Image (cartoon, rainbow, N blue to C red):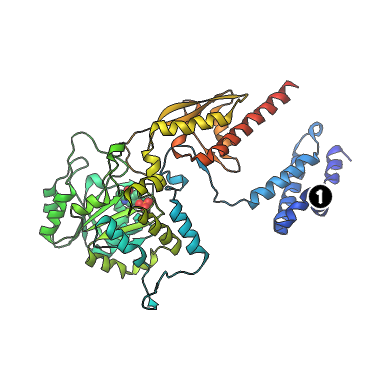
Amino acid sequence: MNRKQALLSKLPNVDETLRDQRLEDFFDDTPRELIVEAVREAISEERKRILKSCDQEIFFDDMIFFDRIIEKIENEKRYNLIKVVNATGVALHTNLGRAVLPESARRNMMEIAAGYSNLEYNLKKGSRGSRHSHVEELICRITGAEAAMVVNNNAAATMMCLAALAQGKEVIVSRGELVEIGGSFRIPEIMEMSGAHLREVGTTNRTNVSDYKTAVNEETAAIMKVHTSNYRIVGFTEEADLEKLSRLGKEMGLPVIYDMGNGLLMDLSEYGIDEPTVMNGLKQGADMILFSGDKLLGGPQAGIIAGKEELIKKMKTFPLARAFRVDKITLAALEATFREYLDRDGAMKNIPVLRMLTESRESIEKRGALLVKELGKLRHFSAEVVPVTGRVGGGSAPSAELKGAAVRLVGDIPAEKVERMLRKGSIPVIARIIKGDVYFDMRTVAEEELPLISDAVKAIDGAAEDDAGRKAK
Ligand SMILES: *Cc1c(COP(=O)(O)O)cnc(C)c1O
């Protein structure tokens, strides 16, 4: 028997391994199947590794073997959707879940999720009620709309509006506003899906009201204006503003739909965020305005349709309304978020998105200083607070430059490697890399999260020290 065969015959089998006390604790709270699976996999991997390696290099390390099994079990037990620390500074990071919800929204979601609710039950009458009723009045009070309803997201809102009002007919849109948002939302494609026909007018950089007017014919069902949320056209440009389009709509007896996206309910121009607000859109005469719940509004993923009562009524009974309806947990979060806006000053403090986007550089720097202090003395890195410029994200306010601050980590380990290790921790930290250094942008990091970053960095620092020690030996 050669060494390979000898080693293979000595490999522990599944039953022996399962009896090992190192796995004992797992049996209390882990399905047995999962442990058996991890053991099987680890043994099979060992077998393959031994068969592949050349004779001199073969070994079997019992410690490594069990570490691998435990790692497998822990990986399997971990949820797939997990918390991460957003140290990118992008408050509306679409890949990281967009808006962080206000405390009130989180509490209300828990309450409603944990038991029964009057979701579609009218408590006054003791009979069937409407799920829209919980937020409609509130949305109207805050935005000034006559009526409102909520669907899954703004994409669904757009799709439904077009289908309900313009199936088989034409909708006029400017060539400068045929937007794509985040890959799969494209105005021409949504339009096609809805069964409405896109009637493009104007040019990429210039469209005026008379372009819309000349395009109107007996097939026209609506005029749509789309906010170019995630890009700006600059230079020799012209667009028909909403006010003029609304006047044209009235003149021609056509509804004007405004897909505005961001859902901003407060004027943030003094903070460098020059975006339209929902109220302004309605004041300028849009018959229907569509926006997301989880962008600048700062709530859960949702699509809000607000505007003229007769149009909204049509939407509510449209068959797609059922397919696009939101669940009770979303409604719970959305109602609580809208309630925050009843007190404007409170909203700025209590809605995380607004708080993050309007926080001053000085205030952000303070959190950076706390992190530097918590990091203390590191062997392989030095950390300092530096000014950075950030973005809003989520395809909103693309030209806004937010003055913020970050903690820069300079060290002898490549930034890409550090970034990768941060990403693979049990609570991953998503950092920025700028010119070869790792940055923790403090705008989107809560004070309570600072220990998560410092523990992660210290662990990397420690691992580097172990590596260095091993090499020196
Ligand atoms: C973001 C956006 C959408 C898509 O909204 P979702 O809520 O992500 O579906 C549609 N239109 C505009 C103008 C947007 O900005």
Location of residue 82 in the rendering, given as x and y in whole percent from the top left corner: 55, 49
Count neighbours of disc 1 (C-alpha within 10 A) and say few if under 14, some if 14 to 19, many if 20 or more: few
Determine whether the residue tagged by mark 1 lies in a helix, strand or loop: helix
> Which corner quadrant holds the C terminus?
top right
Q: Would residue 190 be seen by someone viewing this image from the given angle?
A: yes
Q: Nearer the viewer, residue 80 or 4?
A: 80
Q: On the picture, is 423 further left or further right than 206?
A: right
Q: On the picture, is 234 further left or further right than 426?
A: left
- Identify residue for label 1: 21
Q: On the picture, is 288 further left or further right than 450?
A: left
Q: Quadrant of residue 393?
A: top left
Which amino acid lies under the numbered mark 1 shown in the image of this protein?
Answer: Gln
Q: Would residue 439 be seen by someone viewing this image from the given angle?
A: no
Q: Residue at x 16, y 60 (%)?
A: 254
> Which corner quadrant holds the N terminus?
top right
Q: On the picture, is 457 further left or further right than 12?
A: left
Q: Nearer the viewer, residue 347 or 329?
A: 347
Q: Nearer the viewer, residue 44 or 101?
A: 101
Location of residue 8 in the rendering, given as x and y in whole percent from the top left corner: 83, 44
Q: Residue furthest right?
A: 1
Location of residue 391 in the rendering, given as x and y in whole percent from the top left corner: 38, 37
